[in-house]
Amino acid sequence: MPVSTGTMEITDDGRATLLGGRCRACAAPHFPLAATCPYCGAGSVERMELPHRGTLWGWTAVTTAPPGYEGPVPYGFGVVELGGELRIITRITEVDPSALSFGQPVELVVDTVGATGDGDDLVAWAFSPASSAVGRSAGTQPGSAGERA
């Protein structure tokens, strides 16, 4: 069972897809999907599936559970760029910050973060170091000018 609804789809084989939006007025992508563009306020947003692979921009390890969180600690937390145009804040499966590097390829995974009262897995999306490094994601490179944060 996903932690939140509407942010991702999980296929029968366990693969996740994050759901975002692209504004028809200004063309800006955003996550999560919302009916109104967070950049220009237009109400014309189309649903889009976000890339499964991205580039790691920043990271840390969370070593103390936030209030209300009952999942495993420590856990990784960071910023991942997807498709060269959208950065999202996300869980990172690697908990050792020294094992990660700026620009490292990462891939979307389903991460078990606890259990429901019925004993079913409670899952969220996360990014994990890519199993086969293929370089940076397509598009703009980390640190280049003209980026949308």
Image (cartoon, rainbow, N blue to C red):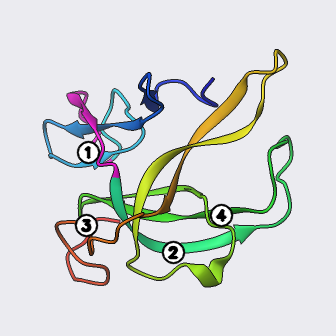
Instruction: Write down the residue under mark 2.
Output: 58
Q: Secondary structure at mark 1?
A: loop
Q: N-terminal of the two: label 4 or label 2?
A: 2
Residue 40 is tagged as: 1
Tags 1 and 3 touching, CB below 8 Å: no
Query: Where in the figure is residue 64, as x and y percent of width and height?
Result: 86, 62
Closer mark to the observer between disc 1 and disc 2:
2
Marks 3 and 4, Cα distance to the nearest angstrom? Answer: 21 Å
Q: N-terminal of the two: label 1 or label 2?
A: 1
Location of residue 96 by image quarter: bottom right
Instruction: Write down the residue under mark 4.
Output: 76
Residue drawn at x 49%, y 82% as measured from the top left: 101
Query: Where in the figure is residue 41, as x and y percent of width and height?
Result: 29, 38
Give whichever of 114, 28 is nearer the camera.
114
Span shown in magenta: 39-52
Closer mark to the observer between disc 4 and disc 2:
4
